[in-house]
Image (cartoon, grey):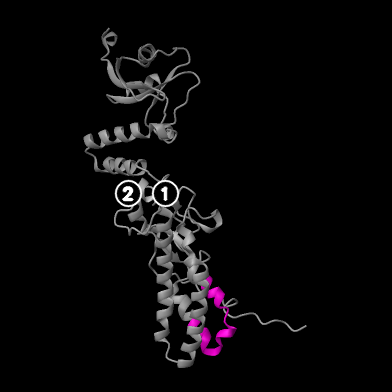
Amino acid sequence: MFGLFKKPKLVKLRGLSENKKYGIAATSLKELLKKGCKMLQVPLPGSRICLYEDGTEVTEDYFKNLAVNAELVLLTKDQNWKGFVCDIGFLLGFSDRHADILIESAQDLLMDEHSEKRRKILRDLLHNLKDNSEVEEREEDEDWFQGIESRFKTKSAYMRFNCENRIRGYMKDVDGYASNIQSAKVQRQYKEIVDCMVEKLKSAKHNGCYFDRKEKEPNRLCTKEGWFSCQGAFDQEKCSSLHSINPYGNREGRILFSTWNLDHRIEKRRTIIPALARALRSHKSSDINWEYFYRLLFTHENLKLVHIVCHKKSTHDLLCDSRKIYKQKKKRK
């Protein structure tokens, strides 16, 4: 007799693609389905209830063990729910015209959220939503250009300069190594090769194209919108963390991008430059395949764009290809 007076269980129920939740009290799954279908105005036949978290379908026995205020989703006959990841799918499907609404909602949530982990997620979301990457000119996004010399009128021009600066830094390291060479003869031969590299690098405009989204696809390391993807540590095929960034989007993204590295797989200071100097001890500069060294030092043949987390500073233990160090002698006919 006492079974007739079961204590109702309070749950939070929502429909598919709906944000609004309804608090419903029910003593059984059957009763919950009936009340839920009426509340959400959906047909009862074929309807079922799943856990919001992972999409597990709730049975009558499972209902008995539900926690108070459990979050549930009511599905009609042809609907599916795979858990909260579905909400991410809906979020990614938002059109640009909904972005302002999304930003406002995220800001409201951030003000009320006390969990530091969730606050970080919301801050990251807001950072990426406040994206102004579609504009290029200085007057269209003055905030992006804060702290940048007035001579730069477009984002692409500055990003190109940024890359050129990095490559110039590599050339400075190459040129500076000459003072470490004891033999005057070898040093002279070394400087001859450096001069050749300098001229080639000038003609290539210091490979500034790598960061310039206006460049053609084979020449740039980003999408036409300005998104860069981490290429993974020197000893990995790709980035397992799927790091990505768009420095064109906002000032914070531009500043954070400065922490990303153009990392030499075969190391510049430990391996490439010393290998070039050693080769000149027994060969003239005219015998050296200096363009091979050039590619290792200054091009994406050996450079990988990596997030700071994927930048391993330990010894790479990769060597130059001995078959490519010297020019191949032409065979006599």
Picture layout, residue 300 above or below residue 40: below
Q: Range of the magenta residues? A: 276-296
Q: Provide residue 241's location: percent of width, then percent of height.
A: 42, 51
- Cα distance, mark 2 to mark 1? 10 Å
Helix, strand or loop status at disc 1: loop
Residue 12, position as x, y percentages in the image? 31, 22
Question: Mark 2 belongs to which amino acid?
Answer: Glu
Q: Residue 10's image quarter?
A: top left
Question: Dividing the image into 4 quarters, which one contains the C terminus?
Answer: bottom right
Front position in the image: 186 or 140:
140
Q: Residue 34, how many percent across, how many down?
A: 38, 11
Label 2 neighbour load within 10 Å: few <14, some 14-19, many 20+: few
Q: Residue at x 27, y 15 (%)?
A: 8
Q: Is residue 160 visible?
A: yes
- Looking at this view, is 227 or 90 the one in front? 227
Q: Is residue 296 visible to the viewer in this orientation of the structure?
A: no
Q: Residue furthest bottom?
A: 184
Number of labelled discs?
2
Q: Which residue is mark 1?
A: 136
User: Which residue has dot 2 on it?
Assistant: 142
Q: Which residue extends farthest right?
A: 333
Residue 163 is one of the magenta-drawn residues: no
Residue situated in front as seen by the camera: 222 or 136: 136
Q: Which callout, 2 or 1, points at the residue further toward the start of the chain? A: 1
Q: Is residue 76 above or below residue 216?
A: above
